[in-house]
Image: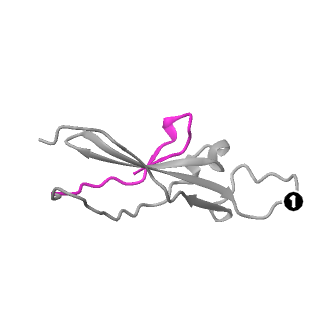
Amino acid sequence: MVYVGSATNKGFDQELDSVLVGPVQQGISRFVLEVPHPDPQKIPSEDLLEVHAALLSGFYKDKEFVRVGYWVHNAYALPLAEGEAPPSRPSPNEMTRTVSDQPIVTRWPIPWD
């Protein structure tokens, strides 16, 4: 699971977790993956209160066959006076995170042998 911390620089991506699963029987499978939240200190200030992505990739024999992406919106949670801007680096307890409930799924054909 990778959290995309900046749309313009892959250097701010954070790997939140990586797991090996298997063997898995052919067919539809369901997994629950709980990962730690991204470290806000590793996200550029100008990108912190923006839209990000969380990407879950599935690999078989080092070939990616599926990627599931979720949009993540970080917002300043405290009330602001009219015209007032949020701080450039709010603390995590001053922020809210909303994760889209409609994932974007991309699949690639790969050899399964």
Which x, y percent locates residue 83? 87, 52
Residue 46 placement: quadrant: top right
In the image: residue 97, left or right of residue 53: right
Q: In which quarter of the image is the C terminus?
A: top left
110, 83: nearer the viewer: 110
In the image: residue 82, left or right of residue 28: right
Amino acid of disc 1 = Ala
103, 76: nearer the viewer: 103
Residue 26, magenta (yes or no): no
Residue at 19% across, 42% down: 61
Q: In this view, does 38 lie above or below 111?
A: below
Q: Mark 1 points at which residue?
A: 81
51, 87: nearer the viewer: 51
Bounds of the magenta segment: 1-23
In the image: residue 14, left or right of residue 108: right
Q: In this view, does 89 lie above or below 44?
A: below
Residue 14, magenta (yes or no): yes
Residue at 28% across, 42% down: 65
> What secondary structure predominates along the stretch shown in magenta?
loop
Which x, y percent locates residue 15? 41, 48
Q: Which residue lies furthest to the left in this view?
A: 113
The number of callouts visible is 1
Q: Residues within 10 Å of mark 1 (few under 14, many from 20)?
A: few
